[in-house]
Amino acid sequence: MLDILYLDDYLAIVNKPAGWLVHRTPLDRGETRFVLQTLRDQIGQHVWPVHRLDKGTSGVLVFALSAEVARSLGQAFESGAGLLKTYRAVVRGWPLPEGLIDHPLKRMPDDMRTERTEIQPAQSRFATLRHFELPLPQQSFVSTRCAEVALQPLTGRRHQLRRHMKHIAHPIIGDATHGKGPLNRAVADLIGLQRLWLHAESLELPHPVSRQRLHLASSLPSEWGLWDAFQLPIVA
């Protein structure tokens, strides 16, 4: 059973578990857990995904109950217009207290459309929430610095947050595509869990019909507490 955060005649918004695919894909034939099919069976009607969260990402995920609503909201998610999305992540290193990443991103292969340009503008904001220091030697250092950050994508490009954090040399821990494999494995061994440490914590959006402002929130998964043993005070 999925945790349903909001449900009416137009929208179904759920708390996606980490490790679940949004829908079936030939790229991951061995997977058996799909949010779309589970939600469809749970509420007894067809649903359309409005946006995507990666398999490893947990948190707020929006479905429409008609193709028309899905198209309307899908355009808003791509442009970022009228939306406020906030994520939590654990990243390598100690980023600045806050910042704006304004870095265009190349459209990824399965997003290619001939009528669109290949390079898309992309902006994300970040704020450092707390620091960690892990007992993992790295090169000439006796420990490994990590940080928990809040992230807000201002546009909706595929893997935007993961690619932007890599761009500023603070990749998200557990990111097999844009992160550091040896570090990901060492961290997983240390804390006893391997996952992409990225969580869609909250979402604000206008309702597609009433235009009322919706505020949805998803609590951090319980495994986030594994980091508490390594927490350090924020350094100003």
Image (tube, rainbow, N blue to C red):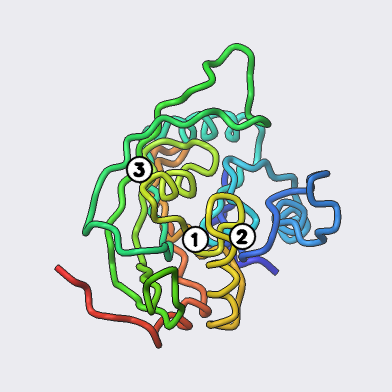
* Residue 8, x across and y down, in percent: 56, 51
Q: Amino acid at mark 1?
A: Leu
Q: Identify the residue position indicated by label 1 in the image.
A: 198
Where residue 34 sits: x, y (%)? 75, 56
Asked if the residue at tag 2 contacts the one at tag 3, i.e. Cβ–Cβ closer than 8 Å, the answer is no
Q: Amino acid at mark 3?
A: Ser
Query: In the image, which disc is placed on residue 160?
Result: none
Q: Nearer the viewer, residue 11 or 163?
A: 163
Upstream in sequence: badge 3 or badge 1: 3
- Position of 36 relative to 69 (above/below): below
Residue receiving disc 2: 56
For the residue carrying disc 2, how many other residues have a C-alpha within 10 Å: few (<14), some (14-19), or many (20+)?
Answer: many
User: Which circle marks residue 124 in the picture?
Assistant: 3
x and y, in percent, of residue 179 in the image: 53, 55
* Mark 2 residue element: loop
Q: Residue furthest left?
A: 236
> Where is residue 149 shown, x and y percent of the image?
34, 62
Give how far apart the Cα atoms at labels 1 and 2 are: 8 Å
Mark 1 and mark 2 lie on one chain; the one further toward the N terminus is 2
Cα distance in 3D space between marks 3 and 2: 20 Å
Left or right: 39 in relation to 154: right
